[in-house]
Image: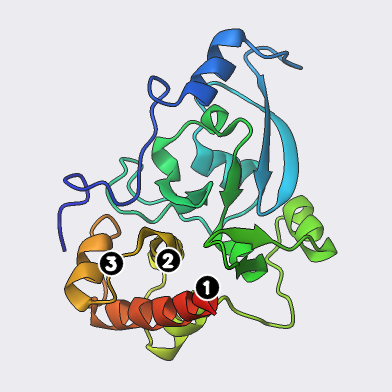
Amino acid sequence: MSDPMSNNHAKSLSPQTDSMGAQALLEGLVTSAENQFALSLQVNGKAISVHVSPDTALVDLLRQTLGLTGTNQGCDTAQCGACTTLVDGQAIKSCNVLALQMQGRSVTTIEGLVFLEASTEHHFKVSHDSILDQQLTSGKPSTLNNHLHIMQQAFLDHGALQCGYCTPGMIMRAVSLVDEKIPIDPHAIAHALGGNLCRCTGYSGIVLAVMQGLRVLRNEVES
């Protein structure tokens, strides 16, 4: 696989380049406690308002504050991709992004994939459901009739996991490829997954799973 730091597959945002997050930091939003800043965003389609410290990473907000532990924490240096989530549809490594940079944005984690549907406009929409409310408040995983997202099912079909630690981030990156128009070709898929590392498998099952998932998702989008 290619060096994850030499490509721009799962992105990292910086306060200097992310105007929305920088504005939130510079304006000094009203706080409820010392060194705590107000943050409003959507997580898996649910409007969330919390107070976070300026140095809180998105991965910590998801795991520690919201209890969405499907986003795994690996290297903390944007190398391994285990923490990959979708921010406004793009794959982002959440260990290298400040929570405050998510001001007004939409974040999707592996727990939210079950609610995603591909529309004809190549965007993802989220179905609001009481199960999602329960998941965000309790921090417990929830299912909807044990339904899996198409990409999750493809990984299951091809046995594209071993210990499973990299799998959530790998699936989130794979889902983001739908709109990136990556060719459904083993070499192209392997290159696109270069920022997500798996230390167990030989990647062949992962590549086959992503190819299957993309075929199905793109057919649905185009139909």
Quarter assignment of residue 163? bottom left
**Outermost residue toward the top?**
27
Q: Is residue 73 left or right of residue 116?
A: left
Question: Label 3 near label 2: C-beta < 8 Å?
Answer: no
Question: Label 2 near label 1: C-beta < 8 Å?
Answer: yes
| Upstream in sequence: badge 1 or badge 2 | 2
Task: Residue 37 in the image: state x and y as whole percent.
Answer: 65, 19
The amino acid type found where label 2 is placed reads Val
Query: Tag on residue 198?
Result: 3
Callout 1: few (<14), some (14-19), or many (20+) C-alpha neighbours within 10 Å? some
The residue tagged 1 is 221
The residue tagged 2 is 178
Q: Report, in whole angstroms, how far the alpha carbon at label 2 lies from the one at label 3.
A: 21 Å
Task: Residue 12 in the image: state x and y as whole percent.
Answer: 36, 38
Q: Is residue 87 left or right of residue 2?
A: right
Q: Check the image and report above or below for 134 versus 12.
A: below
Q: Nearer the viewer, residue 123 or 44?
A: 123
Quarter assignment of residue 102? top right
**Outermost residue toward the right?**
130
Colour mode of the rendering: rainbow
| Upstream in sequence: badge 3 or badge 1 | 3
Callout 2: few (<14), some (14-19), or many (20+) C-alpha neighbours within 10 Å? many
Q: Nearer the viewer, residue 141 or 3?
A: 3
The amino acid type found where label 3 is placed reads Cys
Label 1 secondary element: helix
Task: Residue 100 in the image: state x and y as whole percent.
Answer: 56, 27
